[in-house]
């Protein structure tokens, strides 16, 4: 509109501005299946890290499984960390096999429609796409009871109780993923956000607003030891690293 106004005579520009301020403008067709595509550029966008697609871990039989349509939120404002409680002594080449086992357990034994985590990270810092729907989109996961909306769940392959080793490559990858995913909504990884519980099975009754870290652990909202004391102890450093990747200072 400003470009057009610069090219019109003064009287025409005034009339055009009056029409615009009354809200009479050319209608814009929205694609409701992608609620974030019309958002303006954000100030603190971090680079997207390398993310391996689902095809890197899905076996041919599972790949042919009929997949229900994904569900979406308007944006992602928090990242929730989990440990998968799988053995720690795996080789990183075995990560796809471990993810397949998680997928089989969650879609088979639990009858979920897909793997619950939006992303998974292994010891070597390799990031895998988890739940289907598009890594750059706000896919509603099934990772944290009561707080699946407006969050991204990261399943960290391993068990990270007190004294467990948390490889730097793993925490670097988590920070990079959190920085990029939260940056899409211009959320500072060091900030606090307000989410509304959707399930009384969490620490918060359904409908209750909860103020949480933008990069939080599963135990912040649920009665669980997940993501483990060792990984929880690394959360402050992960938040700071993610903020730096977004170009934030202070």
Image (cartoon, rainbow, N blue to C red):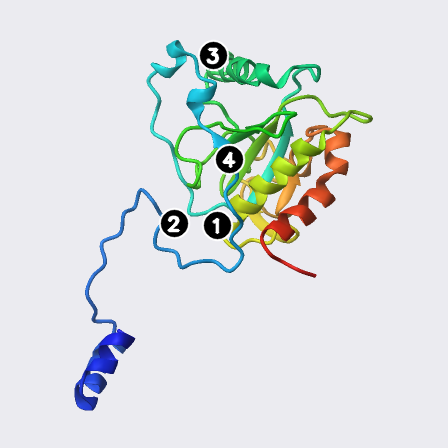
Q: How would you rate the neighbour count of disc 4 (Cα within 10 Å): few for under 14, some for 14-19, many for 20 or more?
A: few
Q: Which residue occupies the extreme bottom position in the image?
A: 11
Residue 217 occupies which quadrant of the picture?
top right
Separation of disc 2 and disc 3 at Cα?
32 Å
Choose mark 3 or mark 1, whichever is in front: 1
Residue at (45, 47) in percent of width and height: 75
Q: Which residue is mark 3?
A: 108
Residue 119, disc: none
Lateral position of residue 22 relative to residue 243, left or right: left
Choose mark 2 or mark 3, whichever is in front: 2
Residue 55 is situated, as x and y percent measured from the top left of the image, at 42, 21
Separation of disc 4 and disc 3 at Cα?
29 Å
Q: Are marks 2 and 3 in contact (CB under 8 Å)?
A: no
**Tag 2 secondary structure:** loop
Separation of disc 1 and disc 2 at Cα?
9 Å
Lateral position of residue 61 relative to residue 98, left or right: left
Residue 236 is situated, as x and y percent measured from the top left of the image, at 73, 45
Q: Which residue is mark 1?
A: 184
- Please report whichever mark, 1 or 2, sits nearer to the chain's N-terminal start: 2
Choose mark 4 or mark 3, whichever is in front: 4
Choose mark 1 or mark 4, whichever is in front: 4
Residue at (51, 11) in percent of width and height: 109
Q: How would you rate the neighbour count of disc 3 (Cα within 10 Å): few for under 14, some for 14-19, many for 20 or more?
A: few
Q: Which residue is mark 2?
A: 36
Q: Are marks 3 and 1 in contact (CB under 8 Å)?
A: no
Q: Are marks 1 and 2 in contact (CB under 8 Å)?
A: yes
**Tag 4 secondary structure:** loop
Q: Which residue is mark 4?
A: 50
Separation of disc 2 and disc 4 at Cα?
21 Å
């Amino acid at each position: 509109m400003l470009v057009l106004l610069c090219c019109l005579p003064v009287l025409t520009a005034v009339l055009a501005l009056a029409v615009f301020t009354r809200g009479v403008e050319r209608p814009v067709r929205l694609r409701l299946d992608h609620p974030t595509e019309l958002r303006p550029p954000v100030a603190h966008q971090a680079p997207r890290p390398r993310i391996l697609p689902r095809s890197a871990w899905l076996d041919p039989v599972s790949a042919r499984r009929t997949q229900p349509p994904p569900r979406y939120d308007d944006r992602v404002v928090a990242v929730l960390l989990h440990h998968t409680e799988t053995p720690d002594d795996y080789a990183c080449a075995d990560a796809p096999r471990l993810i397949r086992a998680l997928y089989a357990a969650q879609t088979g034994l639990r009858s979920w429609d897909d793997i619950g985590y939006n992303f998974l990270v292994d010891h070597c810092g390799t990031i895998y796409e988890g739940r289907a729907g598009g890594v750059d989109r706000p896919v509603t996961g099934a990772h944290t009871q009561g707080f699946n909306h407006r969050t991204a769940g990261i399943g960290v392959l391993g068990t990270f109780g007190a004294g467990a080793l948390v490889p730097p490559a793993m925490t670097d990858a988590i920070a990079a993923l959190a920085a990029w995913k939260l940056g899409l909504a211009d959320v500072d990884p060091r900030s606090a956000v307000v989410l509304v519980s959707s399930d009384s099975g969490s620490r918060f009754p359904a409908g209750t607003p909860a103020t949480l870290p933008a990069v939080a652990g599963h135990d912040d909202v649920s009665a669980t030891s997940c993501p483990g004391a060792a990984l929880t102890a690394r959360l402050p450093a992960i938040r700071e690293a993610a903020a730096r990747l977004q170009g934030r200072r202070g």
